């Protein structure tokens, strides 16, 4: 027998569509779709949908998710279809009910409503900072609270939150005579889906996008208005730019992300660490940082000059200070634990949360820098961004379900991007 015949034949690789490896993303879709469908069922029950309508809609959606298990070539169609049905469906219905079917339970969250009111004020030449939002509608049912709420008299968001949708808001009010902030947030969601697919190749990107939007409970937050989406879209855009070595664009998008919501500061260093891992030199990173700072200043400076006291009071003093006009401690983070334990005596008492946040944030930035430079895996940027947002916000003055969701979304997308079973 010749040597060629005696040599053992190596096993042939199994097809990519065989077994768990080929179906992991669609199985994840099924696992997440079922609890999300239950949440959506509860939402439309509040709206008094006929049970037959709800059962038909959710049944067909789950059937489509199950179809992906046997129709593997159709997963590119099935995944966004199911995500759109379970995530965007309730939002579109909520928008329609609020504007065309007046009802006391057709809600929009106070944050989304306040953002579009800020845009209205700006379109009419009024400074959104220092305005009395209670008088503009936030003080009425169903947004009224049983105690005097200083949040009704302040906007804590930085200007990008209402500047980015402003052209669309002006157009909608001119043509349709109404505007809903959630329209813009839906567009931001589409951008996030596309960017995740760009960042993570193939099956992993599809699974990460599905997990981002079908985290159980996300649709409930989105119905009220998930105002983190624009910031997340800008952060992911900056990460795509860093991946493609377009570092000046990366800096510009990071600056816009921070100008949209201050929480972006927690994730920005990890994107810079990734740029360094991709070969950016320190001078290049410095120029990128300068472009980001220029974008940030261009957005903030007009409002700072317009009314310095109102801007600082709304965006800094209100969320970090104490006294009768301070943001009351609430939620389920460290501050609520200290309040219930008697360490903090009153919900508006001052407490040095800022140094604690700084220690936690800096520790995670340093650890993330070492880890990302050593491992050089892009999903780790998402994991550390989510972990840092979750940890720092937990030890802040307030920690809400939206903050928990933000951390879980980013960490979930990162962990899914690292799963070996999803790699091409």
Image (cartoon, rainbow, N blue to C red):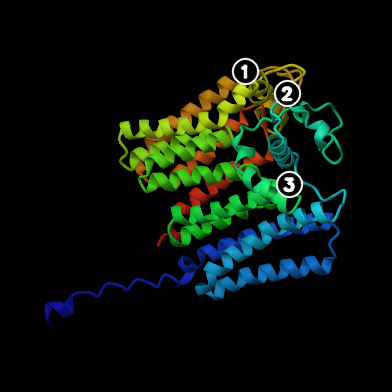
| Residue 220 shows in the view | no
Q: Residue 232's x, y, as percent?
A: 55, 44
Picture quarter with the C terminus: bottom left
**First along the sequence among labels 2 and 3:** 3
Which dot marks residue 424? none
The residue under label 1 is 352
The residue under label 3 is 224
Q: Residue at x 58, y 63 (%)?
A: 80
Q: Residue at x 57, y 61 (%)?
A: 28
| 416, above or below 9, in the image | above
The residue mark sitting in front, 2 or 3, is 3
Q: Residue 365's x, y, as percent?
A: 45, 31
The secondary structure type at the circle numbered 3 is helix
Q: Residue 235's x, y, as percent?
A: 50, 42
| Residue 264 shows in the view | yes
| 236, above or below 127, in the image | below
């Amino acid at each position: 027998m010749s040597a060629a015949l005696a040599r053992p034949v190596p096993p042939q690789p199994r097809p990519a569509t065989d077994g768990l490896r080929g179906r992991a993303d669609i199985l994840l879709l099924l696992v997440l779709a079922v609890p999300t469908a239950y949440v959506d069922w509860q939402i439309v029950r509040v709206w008094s949908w006929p049970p037959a309508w709800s059962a038909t809609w959710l049944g067909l959606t789950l059937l489509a998710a199950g179809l992906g298990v046997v129709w593997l070539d159709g997963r590119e169609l099935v995944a966004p279809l199911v995500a759109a049905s379970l995530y965007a469906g309730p939002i579109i219905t909520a928008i329609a009910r609020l504007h065309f079917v007046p009802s006391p339970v057709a809600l929009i969250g106070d944050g989304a409503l306040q953002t579009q009111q800020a845009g209205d004020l700006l379109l009419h030449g009024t400074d959104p900072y220092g305005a009395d939002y209670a008088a503009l509608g936030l003080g009425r049912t169903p947004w009224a609270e049983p105690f005097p709420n200083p949040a009704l008299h302040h906007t804590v968001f930085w200007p990008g939150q209402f500047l980015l949708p402003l052209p669309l808001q002006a157009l909608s009010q001119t043509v349709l005579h109404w505007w809903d902030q959630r329209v813009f947030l839906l567009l931001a969601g589409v951008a996030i889906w596309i960017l995740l697919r760009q960042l993570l190749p193939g099956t992993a990107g599809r699974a990460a996008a599905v997990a981002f939007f079908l985290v159980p409970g996300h649709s409930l937050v989105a119905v009220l208005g998930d105002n983190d989406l624009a910031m997340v879209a800008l952060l992911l855009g900056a990460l795509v730019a860093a991946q493609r070595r377009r570092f000046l664009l990366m800096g510009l998008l990071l600056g816009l992300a921070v100008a949209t919501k201050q929480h972006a500061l927690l994730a920005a260093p990890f994107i810079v660490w990734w740029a360094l891992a991709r070969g950016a030199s320190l001078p290049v990173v410095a120029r990128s940082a300068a472009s980001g700072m220029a974008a940030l200043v261009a957005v903030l400076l007009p409002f700072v000059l317009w009314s310095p006291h109102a801007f600082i009071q709304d965006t800094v003093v209100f969320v970090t200070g104490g006294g009768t006009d301070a943001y009351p401690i609430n939620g389920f983070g460290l501050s609520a634990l200290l309040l219930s334990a008697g360490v903090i005596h009153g919900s508006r008492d001052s407490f040095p949360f800022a140094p604690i946040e700084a220690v936690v944030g800096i520790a995670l930035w340093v650890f993330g820098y070492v880890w990302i430079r050593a491992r050089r895996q892009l999903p780790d940027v998402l994991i550390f961004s989510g972990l840092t947002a979750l940890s720092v916000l937990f030890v802040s003055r307030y920690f809400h379900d939206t903050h928990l969701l933000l951390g879980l979304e980013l960490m979930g997308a990162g962990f899914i991007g690292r799963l070996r079973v999803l790699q091409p």
